[in-house]
Amino acid sequence: MANLSIVRELCKEKNISLKKLGEEIGIKTPQGVQRMINENSTTIDRLERIAKLLDVPIWHFFDLDPEKKFKASILECENKVIELNKTINDLKLDLNKWETSFNARDDEVNFLTEKYNTLEKLFKEKSAIVEEYKDLIKNLKGLTDTDANR
């Protein structure tokens, strides 16, 4: 059977009012929380929510012998390690996606840079041709002016 008197102590330690606890676990009044503690009676679902809110393992509310508490603690640590490994793997997958995305963007930037350089080269060539045509036109005008003056 759970020992709910621990709830009061944990709330004091964690600076959580019984009213706040009640709101989080679905009990409308602090008196309702007091009654739950005094009667030492609640559902497993509510006890799980209390444990989560107070950041303690659920077995913390049970009077277990030290060996059982130790085994439960080890089991909890193993579960946390499994959860952390899953989180790390998820983060690695996200990192790989980002790297792939950045590599694709790098390829795109390189492609666009090459296109820009090509266009810049073509523009310079065009400018040189335009200058040549201007010189030709100038020379042709000079020839026609000379022919007109003869």
Image: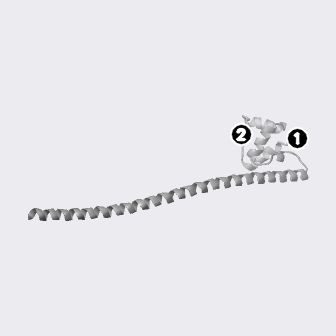
Q: Give the residue type at disc 2.
A: Glu
Q: Where is residue 136 in the image (x, y as percent from the top left)?
A: 23, 64
Residue for badge 1 = 1
Q: Position of residue 133 (x, y in %)?
A: 26, 62
> Would you identify the image quadrant in which residue 125 lies?
bottom left
Disc 1 packing (10 Å; few <14; some 14–19; many ≥20):
few
Residue at left offset 80%, top offset 36% = 35
Residue at left offset 71%, top offset 55% = 88
Q: Give the residue type at disc 1.
A: Met
134 up-or-down from 32: above or below: below
Disc 2 packing (10 Å; few <14; some 14–19; many ≥20):
some
Which residue is at the front of the view, 52 or 35?
Answer: 52
| Badge 2 vs badge 1, beta-carbon distance below 8 Å | no
- Tag 1 or tag 2, which sits nearer the N-term? 1
Question: Which colour assignment does the render follow?
Answer: one colour
Q: In this view, does 20 lie to the left or right of 1?
A: left
User: How many marks overall?
Assistant: 2
Label drawn at residue 24: 2
Label drawn at residue 86: none
Q: Is mark 2 on a helix, strand or loop?
A: helix
Q: Is mark 1 on a helix, strand or loop?
A: loop
Q: In this view, does 89 lie to the left or right of 101?
A: right
